[in-house]
Structure formats: C-alpha cells, structure tokens
Amino acid sequence: MSIGMADDDNGGMGAWKEWPAKAGEFLRNLFDLQFRRLLTPRMLPTLFVLAIIASALWVVAYAVQGFSTSLTDGLVRLLLIGPLAFLTMVTCARVALELCLAIFRLAVHASRMAGHTEDIAGGLPRIQFWKSARRKGGEDEE
C-alpha cells in the first residue's frame, strides 16, 4: 500500500474521500492569521514536485528553442545541457527546501528548549547582579 492511502478494501478510494477534508484543512491553515499551525513544512513535498515539473518544462522549452535555431543546437541542448541543467535546478530546489525545513525544525526545538529553561529557572533563586556592593547589606548611604 502506498503512503497516504487509507486501509480499505476498495483499492485506496478512501484517500479520495479524505481529499475534501484535507483541502478544507489546508485552506483553514492557509488563512490562519494568528499562525497557530505552520503550513510550510507540510507543503514542502508539493513544492518539490512543482520544482521538478517546472525544471522539466524549462528544459523542454530550452530544447525546443534550440531546435528552432538549428538541429545541432537543439540536440546539444536536449542531450547535454538540458539534463545537466535539470539536475542542477532540482538539486538547488532540494537544498533550498531542506534548508527551509531545517530552519523550521530549529525553531521548534528552540521553542521547546525555551520551555525547558523556563521550567528549570522557575525553581532557582533570583540573583540581581546590578545591585551595588554598598546596598547588599541593606545600608543606604545618602
């Protein structure tokens, strides 16, 4: 069974039945003005697929443009430059999306860590470093 398919006996039709609910959840999260739930990490697979499709379309358009000038130019673009450009663009898109995911994961971990430090600091005595040595003993010299 592939990922995202529901476990049912009708050949994965459960995934299609869940689509309207998922679309509704996506739209609710998209227009959540308080940013309670992060949408970007869940969109990364879709963004990567779109980057692959855009890269492939660019390579095809680049090759067609080459064929419009000459057969040799079109073949060089289709067989040599196109595949290298496709791999480069897809690799750059993947790196950028992984960087974005790492930033989001770092933010989540930093938030969790801040919660833990607040818990730890709550039980510690407060130390004020800015009091002068003269006022520590309660002596006010004016």
Image: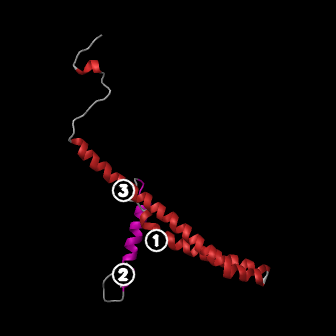
- In the rendered view of the protein, which quadrant contains the N terminus? bottom left
Locate residue 80, reporting x and y percent. 67, 79
| Mark number, residue 5 | 2
- The quarter holding residue 131 reads top left
Q: Specify which label sits upstream in the sequence, 1 or 2.
A: 2
What is the x, y in percent for residue 45?
Answer: 46, 71
Q: Secondary structure at mark 1?
A: helix
Foreground of the two, 138 or 26: 138
Q: Residue furthest bottom?
A: 10
Mark toward the viewer: 1 or 2: 1
Who is closer to the viewer here, 135 or 52? 135
For label 2, the crowd category at 10 Å Cα-Cα, with few meaning under 14, some 14 to 19 and many 20 or more, is some
**Earlier-in-chain disc, 1 versus 3:** 1
Residue sitting at x 29%, y 49%: 115
Crowding at dot 3, Cα within 10 Å, few <14 / some 14-19 / many 20+, comes out as few
Callout 3: SS: helix
* Residue under pointer 3: 108
